[in-house]
Image: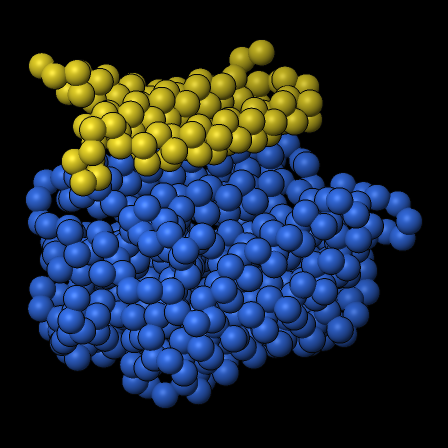
Chain colours: A blue, B yellow
Amino acid sequence: MPGSATAGGFLLIFAIALPLAGVLFSLALGGRYAERVALILMPAGVVVAVAIGATVWHTHDVLQYFVGNWDPPLGVAFRADGLSATMMVTAALLICGIGLFARTQLPVPRGVEERAPLVFWTLLLTVWGALNAVFVGGDLFNLYVALELLTFAAVPLVSLDGRAQTLRAAFRYLLFALFGSILYLLGAVVLYGTYGTLDIVLLSGRIRAEPAAWAAISLMTSGLLAKAALYPLHLWLPPAHAGAPAPASAVLSGLVVKAPFFLVVRLWFDVMPGLPEHAAAQVLGALGAAAIIFGSVVALRQVRLKLLIAYSTVAQIGYLFLMFPLAVEPETGHPWSTAAWTGGVLQAVSHAFAKAAMFMAAGLIAEALGHDRIAGLAGVGRVLPITVFAFALGGLSLMGLPPSGGFVAKAMLLTAAVAAGQWWWAVVVLTGGLLAGSYVFLVLARAVTDAIEPLSLAARISPGRQAVVLALALGAVVLGFVPLRPLELLQIGRPDMAIEAPR
Amino acid sequence: MSDAMLYGLCGAVLVGLGLFGLIVHPQPLRKILAFNLIGGGVFLLFGVVARRGAAAGLAGDPVPQALVITGLVVAFAATALAVALQVRLFQETGGRPDGQMDSRP
């Protein structure tokens, strides 16, 4: 049985409704107020996300809410387990940081209504609401709608400046995303046709190892991989993420690609906990490994900073999928399976902070210099010391050097790989770290050398904006002080715990 | 062959045709149409599932029909967004054939 709605379940509705109400208010009040509405809602959203996290932590149970008090399978359930709560807090903090940064990048001019800022602020809130809907969705069709809402908000963010090049990148992104979501929907139909429910908890009790289930899960997984930009379906990501304005790139790279990954985790660990397939998990891991190597090598060869960071996102997404061969095990309870799972989730969170900081740092550098060619970065370390330092801190997390969240995540994946006897993943993690080190140092080495002739700056960058970037990069560093063991919060609501409870 | 089987196969054929079009055709408009073809196939499958009465063996399950309506709205919004992007791109480039994503004028 799915159980009943829990006290505090209404918080989940708030998490989705607050940002979306903000969108409606912005549109109703007009573009001049969009920024103000967003900035007022951001602290409120953080409070809601932290309250959800605290409730899940305190009650040690999944937070549930049934819309209209209708139980599944007829009603729609929202559920937040430890993983959802973690992702929601991450999203709320990042959106806050990005909002503070964007306040000066895309300011709303006084008195006049301009299109780009209005669109940016409403889309930022929509992305936030859609992300929360993905994180708490307990119904596969509801998740499809949330995923589409996320796509529709993310695609226009790419082409905010309206140049032909970014419009083309946005269109390509849209095609990949639509391709992915229609495959996901097809899988959902097959699941509904076979088992008569789309509720995740009910489904996990009914699903059996049979061709229909395999077909559905493969369709949904491949669709989500296209949205998560896992190699070789990453083609849309670099032009889209590199072409967007800096705050938009930070949202897209830090948060938006994590939503489909989150759903793959939901599918593999929550929808079908009883039937893990070793070979399929190895395929996911192999794609992840290919992404790490390919993304890092291509990143090394970029001449533009934002493209380098975008290709590094392709590589870092690969790490997320290394958790599948290590954490999906025929019999649950292996010590390494939990370590790998925690490592994968930590990688998602720390990459979100690190990559958002790096994209915004690149945005500031591009704004100050008027270009973002890596070859022309000499001297920028003197002009924007805080920004370059923040970039370096983010790079620390990508490389997996201590102290950083990336270090803890990669160390856990590494330990799990060695403990599971699948040493080849360990080799990939280490090689990826070396390659990431190379491309980060490539940038830093240029940035800290002195310019031959004095730099002519295109714009002055205020210390406040640099401080926001530094704060996000420090977020990735602080995650490195998380103890090197499976985190309790992330285990709340794991199916292997649920199996022990009487159904 | 039962009705459900026939319609199911039709849905599968639509999905297949759409996938083929989406991958093979370089023209943006054809890609958008191909996506709608896949959508049509998936929605047909929803109808088949409803007719078969998936949930608790009910004859004529209403849930998939409700899902189809939402799905249609989402697919319509997706198409509108895609076309809007293309229109804007056309205005920006003046319809010149530029690059792989654009068709001949």
In the picture, measured across the screen, residue B80 lies left or right of residue A136, that is right
Residue A403 makes an appearance in the image: yes
Quadrant in the picture for the N terminus of chain A: bottom left
Give residue A102's position: percent from left, percent from top.
70, 59
Which residue is found at the position 9% from the left and 68% from the top?
A: A331
User: Between B14 and A458, which is closer to the camera in this rendering?
Assistant: B14
Residue A399 makes an appearance in the image: no
- Counting every numbered tag in the picture gives 0
In the rendered view, tell whether residue B18 sits above or below residue A363. above
Give residue B11's position: percent from left, percent from top.
26, 21
Which residue is found at the position 40% from the left and 46% from the top?
A: A142
Which residue is found at the position 34% from the left and 79% from the top?
A: A60
User: Between A173 and A128, which is closer to the camera in this rendering?
Assistant: A128
In the picture, measured across the screen, residue A98 lies left or right of residue A139, that is right
In the rendered view, tell whether residue B93 sits above or below residue A134. above
In the rendered view, tell whether residue B53 sits above or below residue A238. above
Quadrant in the picture for the C terminus of chain A: bottom left
In the picture, measured across the screen, residue A174 lies left or right of residue A421, that is right
Give residue A151's position: percent from left, percent from top.
50, 43
Displayed quadrant of residue A78: bottom left
Give residue A91's position: percent from left, percent from top.
52, 64
Direction right: furthest residue: A111
